[in-house]
Image (cartoon, rainbow, N blue to C red):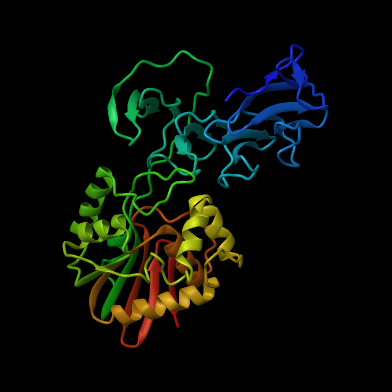
Amino acid sequence: MEFPLPSADKTHHVFDGSPIYEARFLEVREFRFPGLAAVRDETGAYHIDFFGRPLYAERYESVGDFADSTAWVKTADGFFYIDENGARINAETYTYASDFADKTAAVFHAVCGATHITTAGEMLYNDWYYDVRPFADGKALVRGDSGWQYISRGGENLGPAEAPEDDLPRGSVRIEPRKNRIAELLAGQQYDSAVLLLRHAEREPFYRGEPGVGKLVTARGEKTAEALGASLPKITKAHASPMPRCMRTAELIAGISPQADTLLGDPSAFIFDNAKSHEFYQNTSTASAIRAYIKGAELPGHYPIAEGAERLLAHLKEIGKNGLTLCITHDAFAAAFIAECTGYDFADDWVDFMDGCILLREGDSWRLVWREGEKSLP
């Protein structure tokens, strides 16, 4: 498909030599799929369609070109990404953001460091670096504690590399992945029975518009799941969301075949319409949606959060009456459950891979223990 081109004076777009709309701008750039162009006028920078109409009401300091139906925009606070409807793809604001290419972009975060994200607004792999460069030919330059190296799209180290000669940012911040504290939190606890409610291990990345049902545990995820299992007391039984990544995580941690449990996912105790929820999460940042859910927002196909948490708690108590029970779920449901039980809002935090909480029973009393403390349960 041939797109209209900027005019010679860059004030509008033409097709076959004729203007395609009446408006005039201070500057226009080329149209990019799905038919949107970056422009600037006296009000600021934004994107327009083929009719010269603004895509959204907001105005920015500067905007990037659309690629993979995603573009960066810059405000006084920093960079973030929008989709072809003008909506943010996640809640993060970055100190630098590259254009998307092959469904990934390089980003720099003021607190965490540099990494790569997908069109779904999530990390491509589960690591941060001091510096990163965009992917090309299936590999990217990154700078860690040992210097510059190449990594694959899965985050595997492909060997050392020379420092790039460019004017992109040079970072000085890098956070290490948070240590999984589940075994530490369980150790020394007094209980008659216990339930571990955990998110699954590291999985393949999500891309906006793709279904997440078939995403599998990565090789790194399998290794860390086995390591966590080796650090825990003997697990009596295991339950998991029926999705393959959850079933596999439970098997690796527990060393036994898990029971598929739809109250842990697909659909879960929080969802009454699985089709609506799948469609919703396919084009929505999970973390952003659940943070709104925690604050009382209604989500498509979801029960009210209090009702969902009550249903899940009753289920965990029922299956966790004896021994040590492992339950593997998804970040959305683990975060929603913990938030409703404890009041923690996850505003600047999230449930990591294999992060979660522990429910401990002593007689008829239950309490929830997790990395932020503990809480008595009804």
Q: Residue at x 56, y 36 (%)?
A: 69
346, above or below 189, in the image: above
Choose between 330 and 260: the one closer to the eye.
260
Query: Residue 141: where, in percent of width, then height?
Result: 39, 24
Query: Residue 274: where, in percent of width, then height?
Result: 45, 65
Residue 14 visible in the displayed image: yes
Residue 190 visible in the displayed image: no
Choose between 203 and 215: the one closer to the eye.
215
The quadrant in which residue 14 appears is top right
Left or right placement of residue 32 versus residue 143 in this view: right
Q: Residue furthest toward the front?
A: 16
Q: Residue at x 45, y 43 (%)?
A: 207
Left or right placement of residue 128 versus residue 280 in this view: left
134, above or below 356, in the image: above
Q: How many marks?
A: 0
Left or right placement of residue 74 versus residue 210 in this view: right
Query: Residue 272: where, in percent of width, then height?
Result: 48, 71
